Image (cartoon, helix red, strand yellow):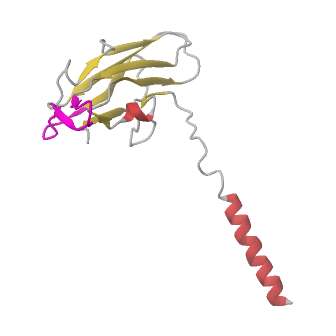
Amino acid sequence: MIKNYIYKTFVLSIMILTLSSCNKDEDILFDTPFISLEALNSASAGPVNSDQEFTAEYKIYLNSGAIDRNVEVEYEIIVGDGLVAGRDYELITKSNTLIFFPGIYDMPIRIKWLRTCVRDEDTGVIISDSLDENKDTSITIKLISNTENLPLGYPGPDQLKKEIKIKKTKAK
């Protein structure tokens, strides 16, 4: 009888602990306004294959309550020495500054990734690929500043989502 009681108590305790640990992956909420940067989807996040051609979208988010004035955000795009504009990619968004007007909370940065891989139409075998993987074949988008002096990236010491690095790789 006592063994049965101890066993039931033990099983009940384990169940309570298990159920109480659920929902630990809830959305993280911040009480401080900040500006962050994210790839719109997994294709944009990379790696980008050299036989792909598409326009990728990266979003700068103004994470705050209502702001009644414009917020100007400056960012930079750092291109690795293994990429050539017009051959490997094209910057669709030409400016390095975006303006959030009141009521606007996300703004896009667009990059068109260009196909550098040429395949034989019949066999699908790669004939040529101008991408040099011995060099830096990445593009980094990095938040620099804003007119409201809001934190860049998620609040905290790691400043996650302050920059994105997208790598272009050779097709296989």
Mostly what secondary structure, the magenta segment?
Answer: loop
Residue 112 placement (x, y as % from top left)? 32, 20
Please tell me which residue lies in front, 26 or 152: 26
Residue lying farthest to the front in this orientation? 122
Q: Would you place residue 147 above or below residue 59 in this image?
A: above
Q: Give coordinates of residue 115: x percent, y percent.
A: 26, 26
Q: Is residue 82 left or right of residue 73?
A: left
Magenta span contains residue 131: yes
Residue shown at 42% from the left, 19% from the top: 108
Tell which of 148 and 101 is nearer to you: 101
Residue 41 magenta-highlighted: no
Answer with left or right where residue 53 lies relative to residue 64.
left
Which residues, given as a range, are shown in magenta?
Answer: 117-138
Q: Is residue 65 left or right of residue 126?
A: right
Report which quarter residue 11 is drawn in.
bottom right
Task: Give x and y (percent) for residue 40.
Answer: 45, 28
The residue positioned 30% from the left and 35% from the top of the image is 49
Please identify the residue farthest to the right as the structure is shown. Answer: 1
**Rendered-image quadrant of the C terminus:** top left
Q: Where is the N terminus found, in terms of image quarters? A: bottom right
Q: Residue 75: horizontal and vertical position, in percent? A: 32, 21
The answer to which of 20 and 79 lies nearer the viewer is: 79
Residue nearest the observer in this picture, 31 or 56: 56
Query: Residue 60 appears in which quarter of the rendering?
Result: top left
